[in-house]
Amino acid sequence: MDFIDYYKTLGVSKDATNEEIKKAYRKLARKHHPDLNPDNPEAVRIFQQINEANEVLSDPDNRKKYDQYGKDWKHAEQFEEAKRQQGAHAGNASYGGNPFGEGQHYTYSGNDGDFSDFFSSMFGDRGSGRQTRFRGQDIHAKLEITLTEAYATHQQTFTVNGKKIRITVPAGIADGQEIKLAKYGGPGMNDGPNGDLYITFEVRNDTGFVRKGNDLYATLPLGLYKALLGGEQVVDTPGGKVKLKIAPETQNGAKVRLKGKGFPVYKQEGMYGDLYITWQVELPTHLSENEKELFRKLSEERSK
């Protein structure tokens, strides 16, 4: 893996303060944002490098590891553990500086076998071509879809680390739900396995329904005359139009359950939640004189 100087990427010195790093990042991110550079793969690459550099240098712990281990900072804990395990066998061996960067130096006085074991454990046996394998870093990403899209199994294409990934999203995916794509994460080191990609879904509601688990809820208008006399009402559901019978004298706030007309159950084909409808009876407006007279007569009749 090529070494990327994060300080150079952000255009700051190695003793830059956190505020200087943040300021440089914001300036470069605005300049190279993909939305401002459509159809420009180079801008996407630079933007990703800027984000990567900021994520490392803006975190004090990661920055310390990076300053010590350079491009292999993600494996700092493995290196430190290897040093602890081999410390008893290293004799008076010592090393300093960045083991993979410029200016590294080694001093040694002791048994050749002990040093060879220590060196191989830390950095691999380069003479024989054997090196320690490290698993790649896991990547976490977010993917926004609409509730309408989540209703049906469909495919989504998105880009992570410059790679286009196409996945099938099962119907019924929930807001905040996370799925794992094995070995789609960061590349391994020394032929080690790739990390995994974790995708968290953000489901944006673009409908008039409220989703609670696999059930859907809606408040729909119902005309006064139909509420009083009964009849039929056509209702739009995510699965299509449904004709409902309205019972005479349906009250405002009355609820109806439509079994199996809710949201699909995740990875259970053919299974659906229920749809609950609350009727909101609408009073007529702009009454004519004849209508007002009829209501007066109705009121008098009800008063008897």
Image (spheres, rainbow, N blue to C red):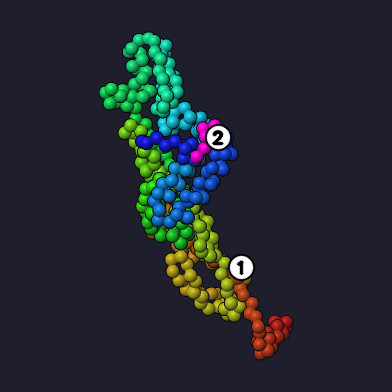
Decide which of 289, 67 is in the foreground and name it. Answer: 67
Please, is residue 285 above or below residue 135 in the view?
A: below
Q: Which residue is mark 2?
A: 16
Viewer can see residue 294? no
Q: Which residue is mark 1?
A: 253
Magenta residues: mostly which secondary structure? Answer: loop
Earlier-in-chain disc, 2 versus 1 = 2
Q: Quadrant of the N terminus?
A: top left
In the displayed orientation, state which residue is furthest to the top.
Answer: 110
Q: Is residue 274 magenta?
A: no
Q: Whole-Å distance between the Cαs marked 2 and 1?
A: 63 Å
Crowdedness near tag 2: few (<14), some (14–19) or many (≥20) residues, C-alpha within 10 Å: few
Residue at image coords 45%, 52%? 34
Quadrant of the rendered structure where residue 135 is?
A: top left
Decide which of 252, 31 is in the foreground and name it. Answer: 31
Decide which of 115, 138 is in the foreground and name it. Answer: 115
Tell me where residue 43 appears, x and y as whole percent. 43, 50
Tell me where residue 136 appears, x and y as whole percent. 38, 36
Q: Is 23 situated left or right of 87 in this image?
A: right
Tell me where residue 291 appears, x and y as whole percent. 65, 87
Tell me where the magenta segment starts and ends, as one range: 11-16
